[in-house]
Amino acid sequence: MEHTENNAIYTAGYRCPSNIALVKYWGKKSGGVQLPANPSISWSLGDLYAATTVKAMQKVDGQSFVFTLAGESKPSFEPKIAQFLSKIAADCPWLSDFTLFIDSENNFPHGTGIASSAAGFGALGMCLAHIEQHIHGSSDLSTQVNGMDFWQRSSYLSRIGSGSACRSMFDKPAVWGLAEAVDGSSDLFAVPLDGDIHPNLQGWKDVVLIVDDGEKSVSSTAGHALLDAHPYAQARFGQAQKNLGLLVLAMREGNVDQFIAIVESEALQLHAMMMTSLPYYVLMRPNTLAIIEKIWSFRESSKLPLCFTLDAGANVHLLYDGKIDETLMNFVQTTLLPYCKNGQYLCSETGKRPIAIL
Ligand code: DP6
């Protein structure tokens, strides 16, 4: 962080992971700003990240921000950022005095269906929370701003950009939304799950099998909105609440079979909600199902600790205990690669923290 009294320049930079939900956020509460209809829990994907820097300077030409993607201007990203900054304006009155020079870059390709908004808004929220701390005259990140510490505030601001982004800044499993099973959980920001996770469920990894790298036919934001009038919405929200409690218990006790059952059921419930929305839609592709079936038969024959999950798209996340890395990658190469678009897949560890880069 650079702070010069005379020309008041504040800078911050973070490398922030994407994340994959184990219990899914799908549906928003009415009447709030980006509040989840049910609690969710995720693992961060440390090797799939956005690296973002923000420089705040005394307002230049009335501009609220200048955005570049890896140093190049990118007008198509500007409306989303403008909308985000206007949504947080009342919460961050200091913004009106500054022009923000935002540069961001993902280390994974755009348009692969990986949650780039989770990493991107995660990193941006962290940068803004950091700058805000300094504007409030504190270089100590544990200082509270608006009743929140740095991590809570980062998560809070990121949430307003994209709900799932608020879970990106923790090395422990991140819980977002009021969860009966998790003390201190909140709709406003995510919290790291406290207490011990059993070694059986630590050190898991994710291979993202890219089935489709095109634009999704229905965006997540539009998909959430369809839950407002969904005939099964209340039952789904209840299931998520229950599944979160059971998943936390499985993670504490090291019950891998129970973990797998909940994670896979959550993925299929998410897509079942899409298929039963009005209008209904299907984001899975034939190769999504082919991969799921291969994963099931490989697990059946090998008895190895692995499972799949899906986000709001056709790609399959293959989660597995990092101890079986070699066997798993062999399975991916020999069996799953033919179902991936142009043989594309991405690998990541789970449970890594963001890194300050300035
Ligand atoms: C299916 O966070 O992308 O990935 O809040 O409208 O930006 P907005 O939606 P977004 O929704 C992600 C939904 C999900 C499940 C999850 O990550 O929990």
Image (cartoon, grey):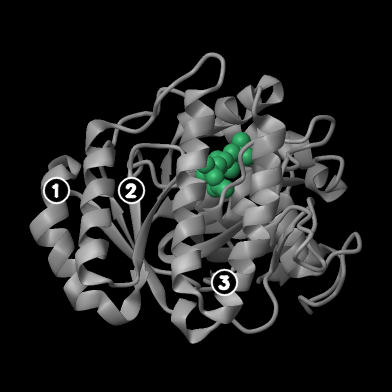
Residue at x 21% of width, y 70% of height = 302
For the residues labelled 1 and 3, the Cα–Cα distance comes to 34 Å
Q: Quadrant of residue 226?
A: top right
**Image location (x, y in percent) of residue 291:** 23, 47
Residue 42 location (% of width, % of height): 56, 60
Instruction: Tell me the crowding category of disc 1: few under 14, some 14 to 19, or many 20 or more residues within 10 angstroms, Cα based.
Output: few
At label 2, the amino acid type is Val
Depth check, front residue: 133 or 311 = 311
Residue 171 seen in this snapshot = no
Does residue 201 sit above or below 243 in this rendering? below
Disc 3 designates what residue? 250
**Distance in Å between CA atoms under marks 3 and 2:** 22 Å
User: Residue 210 or 248: which is nearer the viewer?
Assistant: 248
Q: How many marks?
A: 3
Asked if labels 2 and 1 touch by Cβ distance under 8 angstroms, the answer is: no
Residue 187 at what x, y percent from top left?
A: 78, 51
Q: Amino acid at mark 1?
A: Gly
Q: Which mark is in front, 1 or 2?
A: 2
Real-space CA distance between mark 1 and mark 2, rounded to the nearest whole angstrom: 13 Å
The residue under label 2 is 316
Disc 3 is placed on an element classified as helix
Q: Residue, x 19% and y 66% (percent of image)?
A: 301
Vertical placement of 317 versus 290: above or below? below
| Disc nearer the start of the sequence (3/2) | 3
- The residue sitting at the front extreme is 300
Q: Quadrant of ligand 1?
A: top right
* SS type, badge 1: helix
Residue at 68% x, 82% y is: 195
Write down the residue under mark 1.
Answer: 343
Q: Which residue shows up at 72% across the image and 67% down it?
A: 151
